[in-house]
Image (cartoon, helix red, strand yellow):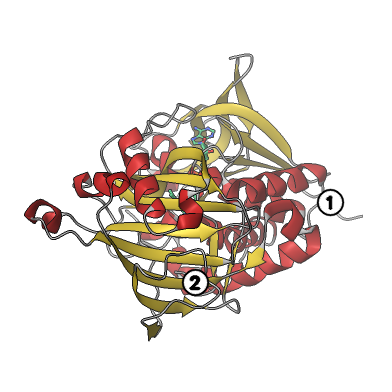
Amino acid sequence: MSAPEEKQNIVIIGGGIIGCTTAYYLTHHPQFKPSVHTITLIEAAKLANGASGKAGGLLAAWANPSNLARLSFDLHDQLARDHNGAELWGYRRVQCGQLTAVVSQRKDTSKLESSSHPNIDLGKWWAGDPKKSSVLPHDLDWFDHKSAQTYEEFADTSSTAQVHPFQFTNSMARLAEQSGARIIMGKVEHINCCNADGASESTSPLTSFDDLTQKKVVSVTYVDKITLEQHILPATTVVLAAGPWTPTLFPRVRIHPLRAHSVTIKLKRPVSAYCLFSDIRLSDSRPTVGAAKPISLEIYARPNNEVYICGQGDLDIPLPPPGNAVEISPDTCHDIINAAMSVSDELRNGKVTGRRACYLPTLDVGASSDPLVGHTELAGLVLATGHSCWGISNAPATGKAISELIIDGKVSCMDVASLDPRRIR
Ligand SMILES: Cc1cc2nc3c(=O)[nH]c(=O)nc-3n(C[C@H](O)[C@H](O)[C@H](O)COP(=O)(O)OP(=O)(O)OC[C@H]3O[C@@H](n4cnc5c(N)ncnc54)[C@H](O)[C@@H]3O)c2cc1C
């Protein structure tokens, strides 16, 4: 008789899209056995509380890094087919283009000229050869054709799609839960380690001073969100998927948390499926206005008569602790709304339904800013973080890779060498 398989307690920290998709792929791995693998996801606030619930939801086979992007695009398509994603999380193929627009000065666009605080590009870029045109596609009928100056087609429906990120993340968590994962609402305070050689039984919280190569993960300490009681959860593997909060538990990872604002506008009718990158400039030639920069917006039509619009990022307000409210700047939301409404009668006649802000997990690790996906030098600690502006698109491939790494001991769905967390020191 063969020896019983050793139990694995897998603890995922973070209920954003990366943590929830990882839980999904672990519980759907062909070798997943509930009698052997215990999977627990711990979230400090609520599922998809951070960027994963407030992002645009653009999916692109042409996103970066390319090893994650292509596979992830196909996996999103597969997930949507397997679980009715069109209905449950608004999955659909979209057109994607970039345009510049000039709008004439009006009362309701006056705020545009005060948009002088330093804005930082969110970093979505496309390396292809756009098809340039001076006219908008005829079915892009909800954008004001008179104000559009140039239009470039980035990509068509063969390589571009979208999801509603909040619905997708929650669906992944629910599917993982139905297949055996446990979800706990609580804030992880520490990842605990002991000596890897087993010479000493004593455990201690992971600190930035530890020699990681001498230690292994044994548990996490968390505070339950409802009871406020502290618990210790044994762990053979910890997947750290805490987005911009990753350094609070593993300081070796350096992240620049970039805040970005977004709004949603409910329209009176459905509009064609376009995701647009736009630069909007005032035509007024007064000197003060001449100095104003164009405002850059990502404008995404969604299936439910909703349009999602986000602006650029800023470093004005430091990242709050996990679970705490993110400060929203009413002025920044106002700028976004005014700029968007200045280029579309449909948007102007719509109703603003949400104003939000959240933080991108943007790595500050030197040469390569690719996400960190894989083992660390600390035995049992796996990272799945730093997805910057492409975490929605790249989540399924990340989750699948992590599930293979933990259950099979190696990743076979793609080459993850460039994502190795051990490249950071
Ligand atoms: C405005 C905006 C638009 C975007 N648009 C797109 C897009 O169109 N397409 C795309 O691909 N990407 C987009 N992104 C990027 C994408 O949203 C992120 O890359 C992605 O959401 C990161 O997911 P995550 O799970 O790593 O982090 P998060 O969503 O931040 O989740 C981390 C979770 O961990 C929890 N947590 C943290 N610390 C602890 C702790 N100690 N204990 C327990 N839980 C903890 C947090 O509460 C949080 O819920 C956008 C981002 C922004 C800001």
120 left or right of 234? left
Look at the image and tell me whether residue 312 can be seen: yes
Residue 3's tag is 1
Q: Nearer the viewer, residue 260 or 252?
A: 260
| Residue labelled 1 has its Cβ within 8 Å of some atom of ligand 1 | no
Q: Secondary structure at mark 1?
A: loop
Q: Nearer the viewer, residue 106 or 148?
A: 106
Residue 410: image quadrant is bottom right
Location of mark 2 (residue): 96
Look at the image and tell me whether residue 196 can be seen: no
Question: What amino acid is at disc 1?
Answer: Ala
Question: What amino acid is at disc 2?
Answer: Cys
* Image position of 136 with respect to 360: above or below: below
* Image position of 225 with respect to 274: above or below: above
| Residue labelled 2 has its Cβ within 8 Å of some atom of ligand 1 | no
Residue drawn at the location 53% of the way across and 53% of the way down? 307
Q: Kindly give the residue lying farthest to the right in the view shown.
A: 1
Q: Nearer the viewer, residue 17 or 383?
A: 17
Label 1: how many Cα within 10 Å (few below 14, some 14–19, many 20+): few
Residue drawn at the location 59% of the way across and 34% of the way down? 43
Q: CA distance from mark 1 to mark 2?
A: 54 Å
